[in-house]
Image: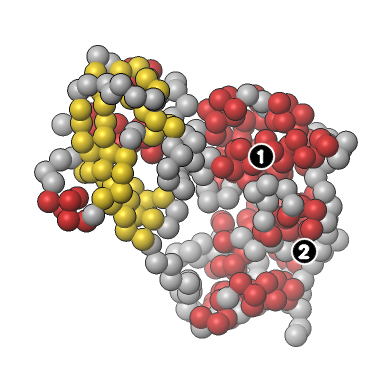
């Protein structure tokens, strides 16, 4: 296999076009490791433009590994509120504690040790090795996947398997500036090689791209089957107070405040005239039937003043359901 000679062209493009992102402004090695850890975890399942204000507030309130290891859980979850996948925030705190046990403020420098940290898998481990240790690895995020599929014109199911895409990363080459090169690849995918209507005239490597030569930019994706599930939510609301419970029943939003809810059959959902709400969580399409009661139940739970619901540590999932319940 012949490695493409593209790293210098991409790096030159990156030097002239990179975005001014807050996690690229570290002032020390320790801060750089911390910024990379926080940003990479936040960017899982979340777009850059969404992450930027969260990142800025998070590192202002929790500026380093030590403060993260000691932060109050309520404060941590409040800072994360709206990003979703709250287990990421909890894993960050657990990771901070483990890093401090090593008597260092730096992330591990091997794939094995990184993967032993909570919430850090293959992609994030490789990103850290490249971004913080300049190791010649390329993490496979959505942007780099798209570059590979287009450059090599991958159009078959077996061609887009992760194992094959990982092999193709080697053909992208490497650089003595691997930290910058990896960011450049991500940036190129995000800004130029977009999912739809790629800006090929602005691409520094269009002459190396099979999709450009064939004028076929379609992206083949693995088809993920989304499960459809039906739930009934009981909203207890009286005198500006609402009743919530800590979720220890469902796999989503573990240990966070939700309305009492149960899974139901489709026939009950479809036959009811009550208000309904739909939301997607991970690979589950949730169809929710809303049942409103004007009496607070006498059982274990949490009472929240709904006028102050914006200040409470409540997932956006719960707030969205309440907004629908209040709507006419």
Front residue of 13/29: it is 29
Q: Quadrant of residue 33?
A: top right
> Which element carries disc 1, helix, strand or loop?
helix
Of the 4 image quadrants, the one containing the N terminus is bottom right
Front residue of 84/302: it is 302
Q: Quadrant of residue 288?
A: top left
* Residue 161 x/y as whole percent: 58, 76
Residue located beneath label 1 in the image: 92
* Residue 270 x/y as whole percent: 16, 53
Count of numbered labels shown in the rendering: 2
Residue located beneath label 2 in the image: 137
Query: Could you tell me if the residues under marks 1 and 2 are in contact, i.e. CB atoms within 8 Å?
Result: no
- Which residue occupies 33% across, 35% down? 260
> Which element carries disc 2, helix, strand or loop?
loop
- Which residue occupies 23% across, 38% down? 290
Image disc number at residue 253: none
The chosen color scheme is secondary structure
* Residue 191 x/y as whole percent: 56, 56
Q: Is residue 304 left or right of residue 144?
A: left
Dot 1 alpha-carbon crowd within 10 angstroms: few under 14, some 14 to 19, many 20 or more? many
- Which residue occupies 39% across, 55% down? 284
Q: Is residue 143 left or right of residue 198?
A: right
Q: Where 136 falls versus 286 (above or below)?
A: below
Q: Is residue 108 visible?
A: yes
Residue at the extreme top = 239
Q: CA distance from mark 1 to mark 2?
A: 23 Å
Front residue of 9/97: it is 97
Front residue of 129/228: it is 228
Of the 4 image quadrants, the one containing the C terminus is top left
């Amino acid at each position: 296999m012949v490695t493409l000679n593209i790293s210098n062209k991409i790096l030159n493009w990156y030097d002239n076009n990179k975005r001014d992102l807050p996690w690229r402004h570290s002032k020390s090695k320790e801060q750089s490791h911390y910024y990379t850890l926080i940003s990479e975890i936040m960017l899982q399942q979340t777009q850059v433009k969404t992450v930027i204000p969260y990142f800025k507030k998070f590192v202002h309130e929790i500026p380093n590994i030590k403060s993260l290891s000691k932060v109050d859980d309520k404060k941590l979850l409040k800072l994360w509120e709206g990003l979703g996948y709250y287990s990421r925030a909890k894993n960050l705190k657990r990771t901070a504690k483990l890093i401090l046990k090593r008597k260092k403020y730096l992330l591990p420098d091997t794939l094995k040790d990184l993967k032993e940290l909570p919430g850090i898998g293959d992609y994030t481990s490789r990103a850290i090795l490249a971004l913080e240790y300049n190791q010649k690895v390329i993490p496979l995020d959505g942007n780099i996947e798209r570059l590979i599929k287009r450059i090599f014109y991958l159009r078959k199911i077996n061609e887009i398997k992760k194992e094959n895409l990982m092999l193709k990363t080697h053909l992208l080459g490497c650089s003595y500036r691997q930290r910058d090169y990896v960011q450049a690849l991500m940036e190129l995918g995000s800004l130029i090689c977009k999912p739809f209507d790629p800006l090929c005239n602005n691409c520094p490597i269009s002459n190396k791209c099979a999709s450009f030569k064939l004028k076929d930019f379609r992206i083949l994706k693995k088809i993920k089957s989304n499960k459809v599930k039906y739930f009934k939510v009981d909203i207890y609301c009286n005198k500006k107070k609402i009743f919530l419970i800590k979720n220890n029943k469902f796999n989503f939003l573990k240990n966070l405040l939700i309305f009492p809810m149960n899974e139901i059959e489709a026939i009950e959902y479809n036959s009811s005239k009550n208000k309904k709400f739909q939301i997607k969580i991970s690979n589950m399409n949730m169809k929710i039937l809303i049942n409103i009661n004007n009496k607070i139940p006498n059982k274990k739970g949490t009472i929240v003043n709904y006028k102050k619901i914006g200040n409470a540590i409540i997932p956006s999932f719960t707030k969205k359901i309440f907004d629908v319940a209040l709507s006419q």
